[in-house]
Amino acid sequence: MVELGGAPADARHPTISELLEERLNRAPLLTGFSDENIRQLASIMDGPIHVPQGRILFEEGAPGDALYFILSGSFEVLKRDAGGAALHRLALLTAGQSIGEVSLLDSGPRSGAVRAVEDSEVMAVPIARLREQPDSPLDVDSRLKINMAYELAARLRRTNEVTVETLRSRLSEAENRVEMSKFIFRLLVGLCFYMFALGVTTALSKVVPDTSLISLPILTGFAFGVYRTVKTSPWPPSTYGFTLKNWRGNALEGIVLSIPIAVLIVLLKWIGVTFIPALQGQAVFDFARSTGLSVGEVLLYGSAYCAFTPIQETIARGTQASFQLFLTSKYKTLEAILLSNMLFSATHLHVSIMLALAVFPFGLYWGWIFARQGSLVGSSVSHALLGVFGLMIVGIPVF
């Protein structure tokens, strides 16, 4: 007996023991072989070869230079997916079965890896040594069967590829279902938390004039949920927009894309002060005068708004990215933008209904920027610029 990887003690066996002959007789590939045929085959075999549990008999892509017969133990046939990251078991082979028989028909590389599930023994038939044996004339029936075997070998290789792709797809679907269940759980917890916060805000509004400070714990709660989603996700943080790749270009694009919306805000304000009686007499550019805040307070509130904008975008776009991962329709990007911004808009109800309605179209725009860039940079820059411009410079009355 020889150890896999070591030098054979007796590589050639001109005769075989009765026990070995009995084992080979059980091999389906040798069905119909006479005792003389088996002795002739055994004379060019190497082994028995001991393969310890967990040892790789041969790797995927290795040259197909030998055929193996399992004398004892078992082996699993493994195939890597397209990315080469995961191994999938295609078959389990036990004593009496053969391994690597496709090598008999073509000289292609191994279509999969083979690993010992337990301590096992095999006999090896070197293909080169087998081809040195004298050929006998073939009749039409034998030639057809051989040609059919060649065709079946080619189909088997293609089938292995399809099987692995199917397994990979099913594994991905299972991972998506697990992540979706986690996301829905956190989303429902967050919505319940928000409903309680909304109730508290309603009660406080009868006592204090300004309940906007309730935004801080609400944002913190939702941000924590998004953080946990990203932290436990099998996908990289860049999937949720956490990437600085091309951040300068994304930031510049966020500024440029904000210009037409800023012009639209000014136009809406002008229409309001021109045609709406309640707004007549107001300036198109308010510069926070109507709020009664000092310049220092305006700068402070503006800075705070810009500081919290990335948190708001993390919540909205993290939710959008999660929806886009789990939705399967043709328009999943659009659906993800709509769903995430409905939630984003609803989280402003504690401030005012007008603000919740006003932020919805802006959220759609920022969601489009995020889907376009795959980064939080551009949408955060645009959000900060348009928020400060609309609320403090133009003074859109949404509170």
Image: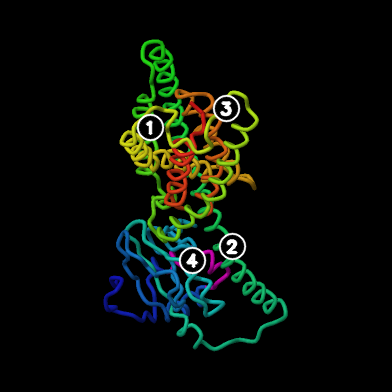
Q: Looking at the picture, which amino acid does disc 1 mark? A: Leu
* Label 4 – label 1 distance at C-alpha: 73 Å
Looking at marks 3 and 2 on the same chain, the residue that comes earlier in the sequence is marked by 2
Q: Residues within 10 Å of mark 4 (few under 14, many from 20)?
A: some
Q: Which mark is residue 25?
A: 4
SS for dot 1: helix
SS for dot 4: helix
Looking at marks 4 and 2 on the same chain, the residue that comes earlier in the sequence is marked by 4
- Residue 306 position within the rendered picture, expressed as x and y whole percent measured from the top left: 37, 42
In the rendered structure, the answer to whether residue 68 lies left or right of residue 150 reads left
- Residue 2 position within the rendered picture, expressed as x and y whole percent measured from the top left: 29, 73
Q: Which residues are magenta?
A: 21-34
In contact (CB < 8 Å): disc 3 and disc 2: no
Q: Quadrant of the N terminus?
A: bottom left
Viewer-proximal residue, 394 or 364? 394
- Residue 70 position within the rendered picture, expressed as x and y whole percent measured from the top left: 42, 64
Q: Nearer the viewer, mark 3 or mark 4?
A: 3
Viewer-proximal residue, 283 or 334? 283
Residue at 54 percent of width and 26 percent of height: 354
* Label 3 – label 4 distance at C-alpha: 98 Å
Residue at 40 percent of width and 68 percent of height: 20
SS for dot 3: helix
In contact (CB < 8 Å): disc 1 and disc 3: no
- The residue carrying mark 1 is 219
